[in-house]
Amino acid sequence: MVSSIEEPRQIKTDEHTIKSGWLEVGHGHKVWYEQWGNKDASVPVLYFHGGPGGGYKPSHKYNLDPKKHQAIIFDQRGCGNSLPYGRTDHNRTEDLINDALMILDELGVKKVHIQGGSWGSTLALLFAIKHPEKCQDLVIRGVFTGTQSEINWIDKGLFINHYPEVWERFLGTVPAENRSKPAEYHYEILNGSDPENFQTSAKALSELEGPLLAFDWPGFNDIQLDNKPNDMPEEFDFVPYKIFAWYLSHSCFLSESYILKNASKINCPLFIIQGRYDMCCPPITAYKIHKLVKNSKLFMTLASHSNDPETRSVNQALIQTIY
């Protein structure tokens, strides 16, 4: 349980940190950022983390060589170390793009390489559409663009042919009368003002999404043995899925197919790494983006949505080649 939404999370700096702290971005939000690695790198890497609500992990920057590269990473509004933790008002997709721009201005950075996976790929693509002058190139993976069909893939259980037991378990977390729209049931709770059921709904959403992220999910037998899917440890943190619910219930605050309709505006090199067996973000979206962006390359990997070995290998090869 989160004790207070005003408390920062654990700070993730190390000996390679150049600068870190909170940047006031308006309406009471303070976004936490870190500038890390080689302070003399000519073009830093700006990293957008996944989610929505996920926060950034140290492993995101450790893909880079601190002696050669520079990374700029930040926790999106309401996530990780950003304050207030878990706040959703004045927390929309456009705000996150503007926050990234403010951080670059604060650091005096004129141009960046862009990286992002999953929800981070959404923000990376949007940043490149809205601020092409800032973008040297993009490397994205597990592509998601916020269309209703992509959201429905998870929310409406369209993956059921592959994970029938996961969808059955999810249906068991809602009353019988809500089983035609189970995700909406949990979104409504998490978007509400009564925290009594926040943990229960957040855990249900995490157990819906979690199995779809991995290439080989070993949880089938656990589901058969677990007769109480709504049980949870007391320390379960509902905030990431509260923000997840806020964004997905509002169609990620994007007009329908916005990124697909504007992808042709991306004029820098785009490198797409997509797991062939991604059950969270099916490959069709990556393929559509590849066909729409003239200067793009698509690498289909034997992988899931997660950063599996072949995906990591391609990503490392791109880092060595283009950074």
Image (tube, rainbow, N blue to C red):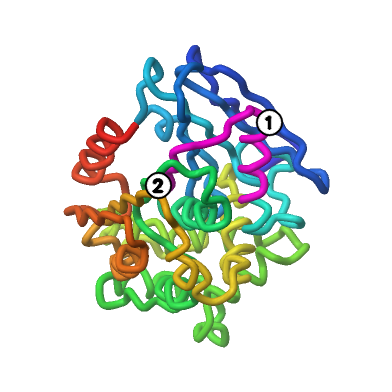
Determine the image quadrant of residue 18: top right
Residue under the point 19% across and 45% down: 310
Of callouts 2 and 1, the N-terminal one: 1
Using the image, determine if residue 68 lies above or below residue 296.
above
Left or right of residue 138, residue 29 in this image: right
Which residue is under mark 1?
Answer: 106
Q: Residue 138: give its label.
A: 2
Marks 2 and 1 sit apart, C-alpha to C-alpha, by: 22 Å
Q: Does residue 108 belong to the magenta stretch?
A: yes
Residue under the point 30% across and 34% down: 319
Residue under the point 53% across and 18% down: 17
Which three-letter amino acid code belongs to the residue tagged 2? Leu
Determine the image quadrant of residue 89: bottom right
Q: Quadrant of the C terminus?
A: top left
Residue under the point 26% across and 30% down: 320
Which three-letter amino acid code belongs to the residue tagged 1? Glu
Left or right of residue 247, residue 272 in this image: left
Viewer-proximal residue among 269 and 164:
269
Image spot of residue 49 (x, y percent): 49, 45
Image spot of residue 258 (x, y percent): 53, 71
Please identify the residue farthest to the right as the structure is shown: 27
Range of residues picked out in magenta: 97-116
Q: Is residue 297 visible?
A: yes
Please identify the residue farthest to the top as the structure is shown: 15
Label 2 crowd bin: few (<14), some (14–19), many (20+), radius 10 Å:
many
